[in-house]
Amino acid sequence: MALRPRQMGALPLLYPILEVLGVRQTVNELVPTEADIDLGRVVLLLTLHRLLAPQPLYQVQDWLAETVLPEVLGITPQQAYDNRLGRALDRLYPTWASYEPGWPVGPSGSTIWT
């Protein structure tokens, strides 16, 4: 097996903070799922991506492949495709919006997501 260089960036600093905050556990308690990748791990992935390499969802998969996160989170780059990440955000939105009453709404009273 050949060694491949991987990006770490600020991951050793940020990941422990997210762990102490209990991000994964909190998300999984609020929005349980039976998916093979729990929403807590997806939130960790997207949070770290936003903090370390803010790019669109369709670039998360390529970024993930260059990092140590597949080993840390147990998510392969093939599992982190943009449609899956978008569906996870859609699943999280109703719960999150209920905690954020000031979230932007359209003229008809619908959220910006509809």
Image (cartoon, rainbow, N blue to C red):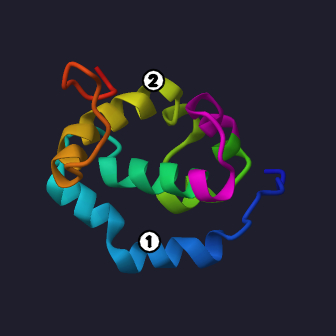
Is-magenta flag for residue 53? yes
**23 horizontally vs 48: left or right:** left
Q: Label 1 near label 2: C-beta < 8 Å?
A: no
Instruction: Estimate the x, y position of residue 68 in percent, counting from the top left.
Output: 66, 59
Residue at screen point 55% across, 42% down: 76
> Residue 98, position in %: x, y?
15, 48
Find disc 2 in the rendering and name its residue. Answer: 83
**Left of 69 or right of it: where is 4?**
right
Badge 2 density bin: few <14, some 14–19, many ≥20, Cα 10 Å: few
Q: Which element type, helix, strand or loop, lies under badge 1?
A: helix
Q: Quadrant of residue 55?
A: top right
| Mark 2 vs 1, N-terminal side | 1
Looking at the rendering, the stretch of residues picked out in magenta corresponds to 50-62
Q: Is residue 21 magenta?
A: no
* Mark 2: amino acid: Asn
Q: Nearer the viewer, residue 59 or 99?
A: 99
Please determine whether, in this image, residue 110 is positioned above or below residue 49: above
Q: Residue at x 76, y 59 (%)?
A: 7
Give the CA distance from mark 2 to mark 1: 24 Å
Against 19, residue 90 (above or below) is above
Q: Which residue is mark 1?
A: 18
Label 2 sits on a secondary structure element that is helix
Residue shown at 84%/51% (left/top)? 2
Local packing at callout 1 (Cα closer than 10 Å; few below 14, some 14-19, many 20+) is: some
Q: Main secondary structure of the magenta part?
A: helix
Q: Is residue 58 left or right of residue 75?
A: right
Q: Which of these two is toward me, 50 or 61?
A: 50
Can residue 74 be seen in the rendering of this structure?
A: no
Q: Amino acid at mark 1?
A: Leu
Left or right: 88 in relation to 12: left
